[in-house]
Image: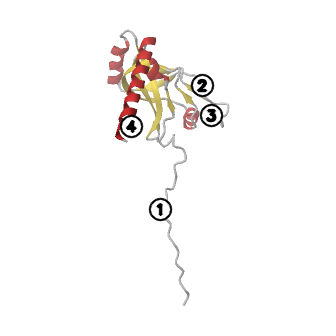
Amino acid sequence: MAKQTTHQIQPNREKNPRRQPTASGERDAAVNRNASHNYFLLEKFEAGVVLSGTEVKSVRSGKANLRDAYGLLKDGELWLLNCHIGPYDHGNYANHAELRTRKLLLHKEEIRKLIGKIQQKGLTLIPTRMYFKNGKIKLELALAKGKQQWDKRETERRRTADKEAREAISRSRK
């Protein structure tokens, strides 16, 4: 009789290990850090973005920039302007235009709500971050009001005071 060999069974591994933390939703694809510095962010909305295939691949590789982007309501539809998505490295002649106007997808109720609020003086739509959710690219839009220079200084003062207070509390606990 032949001797049976024992072998170790490896634990079940994922068939498709997550290679890109951005595409799997662990990390944001793009963040607008200047938004909270330059604006008072009043209310946030989640919107879908209509993109072409090469744009999605560029966003996955981290080539999206929201710094100068803003939202615009026109004829009952929401549009994203000045959002820079770099060209896809392996794209061909059908690669996308980098600064094209992209359509945003929101429910009609949310658009109606935004129409009333945007018509107020000084309010605008600013994208704060772009991320993946269930394999789809989503954009977080904030209804924002612009800050004056003294507002920015006051926010900075408040932030440093809070930081110093937290440090003092942590020092007193030690």
Secondary structure state at the residue bearing disc 1: loop
Q: CA distance from mark 1 to mark 3?
A: 35 Å
Secondary structure state at the residue bearing disc 4: helix
Contact between marks 4 and 1 (CB within 8 A): the answer is no
Q: Position of residue 106 (x, y in %)?
A: 39, 26
Residue wearing tag 1: 12
Task: Tell me which residue sits at (52%, 52%) in the image.
Answer: 17
Residue wearing tag 4: 171
Residue wearing tag 2: 98
Q: Position of residue 46 (x, y in %)?
A: 39, 29
Task: Tell me which residue sits at (37%, 26%) in the image.
Answer: 44
- For the residue carrying disc 2, how many other residues have a C-alpha within 10 Å: few (<14), some (14-19), or many (20+)? some
Of the residues tagged 2 and 4, which is closer to the observer?
A: 4
Query: Which one is nearer the viewer's eye here, 114 or 159?
Result: 159
Q: Earlier in the sequence, mark 4 or mark 1?
A: 1
Task: Tell me which residue sits at (55%, 37%) in the image.
Answer: 60
**Which residue type does callout 4 highlight?**
Arg
Q: Position of residue 134 (x, y in %)?
A: 43, 41
Q: CA distance from mark 3 to mark 4?
A: 50 Å
Q: Earlier in the sequence, mark 1 or mark 3?
A: 1
